[in-house]
Amino acid sequence: MLNSVIFWKLLDIFILIIEWISLYILINDLSIKKVSKNQSFFSFLLILGIAFAMNLLGIFPNVRVFISIMLSILYVKLNYEVNLSMAIQCYAQALFIGEKIELCDKVSYDLTPECFKGVDN
């Protein structure tokens, strides 16, 4: 099952949906809307569709992260009453935390036994 490409693609899509839905719920609870609920929801679905398409098209993960950050900043700025500099500052802090997580991931990969590193999909 872990060697199946379909399993990993479905897992990526599932995680992507959870990430965007959690962002949508968090921003809806903490921010003041400046557009209608329907317009906010449809713009969210558009961004979710773009993120889904980027995943299916196989865009390089680092580029996907950068595009997703720009899309989420654009989404928040267009649909909610927020200060742009505050949003950028929050993303800078999130990127710093993300870099720490990525470093932990690389260290854990280095500690992985050699018999598991070369498993083909």
Image: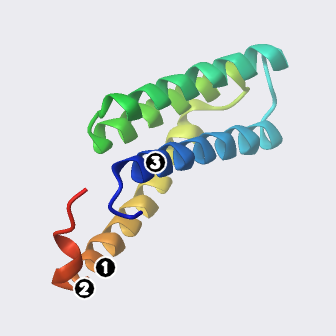
Is 93 situated above or below 13?
A: below
Q: CA distance from mark 2 to mark 1?
A: 5 Å
Is 98 situated above or below 89?
A: below
Q: Which picture quadrant has residue 44?
A: top right
Hey, what amino acid is under mark 1?
Ser
Residue 39: x percent and y percent? 75, 13
Q: Which residue is mark 1?
A: 108
How are the colours assigned in the image? rainbow
Hey, what amino acid is under mark 3?
Asp
Relative side of 11 to 67, left or right:
right
Q: Which picture quadrant has residue 99?
A: bottom left
- Depth-wise, is mark 2 or mark 3 nearer the camera? 3
Hey, what amino acid is under mark 2?
Leu
Q: Residues within 10 Å of mark 1 (few under 14, many from 20)?
A: few
Q: Which residue is mark 3?
A: 12
Relative side of 114 to 59, left or right:
left
Residue 104: x percent and y percent? 35, 75
Local secondary structure at mark 2: loop
Q: How many marks?
A: 3
Q: Which residue is mark 2?
A: 111
Q: Residues within 10 Å of mark 2 (few under 14, many from 20)?
A: few
Residue 5: x percent and y percent? 34, 50
- Depth-wise, is mark 1 or mark 3 nearer the camera? 3
